[in-house]
Image (cartoon, rainbow, N blue to C red):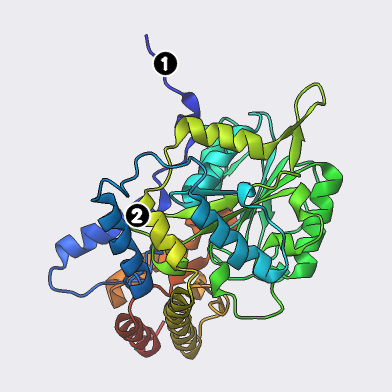
Amino acid sequence: MTLINENYLNLQGSYLFAEVARRTAAYKASHAGQEVISLGIGDVSRPLVPAVVEAMKKACDEMGQAETFRGYGPYEGYDFLRKAIAEHDYRARGIEIGEDEIFVSDGAKSDVANFQELFSSSARVALQDPVYPVYLDTNVMAGRSGTCKEGQFERIIYLPCTAENHFAPQLPKEHADLVYLCSPNNPTGTAMSKAQLKKWVDWANEHKAVILYDSAYEAFIRDENLPHSIYEIPGAQTCAVEFRSFSKTAGFTGTRCAYCVVPKALKIEDETGSEHALNALWLRRQSTKFNGVPYIVQRGAEAVFTPQGLTQTRQIIDGYLENARVMLSALRQAGFTAYGGENAPYVWLKTPKGLSSWDFFDLMLEKLQIVGTPGSGFGRAGEGYFRLTAFNTPQLTQQAAQRIASFSF
């Protein structure tokens, strides 16, 4: 008899965004003709910018010529893209990251999901709560979670991020081997300061822990005092892996391109106390399980860093931030307490009148035809909250704001 991997049986319900999509589809099917505005799943609405499109077209033409055709590319990404990333995302900020410390992939979701494979199944994991579900679910799949009791797993260390602590995770009181941090945060839309990050870096180095730092939304930071990279903090290269994405930065949700930085100085021990570089282990993993991002897509990603690409993508991001401002204004006009939306594309609001997150989801869908994401889907500390994204068009965002501002909650 073939036996199932029973860790998968510990997963709780369906994947959050799949459930949002299912409920939305059911509503649309029974309410034909009603315009439903999606501010739920964080998919972008603006097309690829001209600089990216032209680069992809040129690369496509190259692939159609024998002299410039390319087959399998490097597992870690083409040198031209890794160089552009190192120069523009790090060295321009005074951070020395080697090109051989950068690994191009098909998405930050894939990277943060897969990176945990490098660690022992006995490793203790600490997570922000609320949290992007992939961090938790992949560790459940790997067998690190234990059983779930009252909505939380017994072996996972939860770091509540609430209004009371300004949505900033506090250092764990017990030992943790892996810590997932996300800033600017999904779902709360808040960002960590350099002082807050320094506490984490110092703690991780002292306790020989590894920080898995998701900065997929760093391009939305407009506050000059906020760090764009964890490597702006001294000591981070010996304790942190950073994940970045072109999905929200440049609209690559449908073309798939991201990268992670694995410093060579970051090492972990085996049971005998011998040290091993995570950089070499990640390359070994990727060369076994991943064939790389298509050449055409990587040329498009490279174009993001050209003067034209930087200008054009910033205009897109500014537009999404304006959407967030519009939503924040409408919510506050309607009497809501809302957070985020200033250095991130997410607005995090307190549900009214003690409504549960899913009850508020149903109310928004049935009364206003607006789709958001229930906060409880991100963890127990997310109950009583609701996430709205700024990724729809300006026109539909304005419509959604008008519906909210005119409705009596």
Q: Identify which residue is drawn at 70% across, 65% down.
A: 168
Distance, label 1 to label 2, CA atoms, is 41 Å
Q: Nearer the viewer, residue 155 or 344?
A: 344
Q: Amino acid at mark 2?
A: Ile
Residue position marked by numbered label 1 in the rendering: 3
**Mark 2 crowd level (few <14, some 14–19, many ≥20, 10 Å Cα):** some
Q: Against 101, is 405 above or below?
A: below
Query: In the image, residue 323 lies at what x, y percent?
Result: 42, 82
User: Is residue 81 shown left or right of residue 18?
Assistant: right
Which quarter of the rendering shows the N terminus?
top left
Q: How many marks?
A: 2
Q: Position of residue 374 (x, y in %)?
A: 45, 62
The reply to whether residue 167 is in sight is: no
User: Which quadrant of the structure image shows residue 394?
Assistant: bottom left
Q: Nearer the viewer, residue 256 or 69?
A: 69
Residue tagged 2: 296
Element on which disc 2 rests: helix
Residue occupying image coordinates x 56% and y 80%:
342
Question: Label 1: how many residues lie within 10 Å, few (<14), some (14-19) or many (20+)?
Answer: few
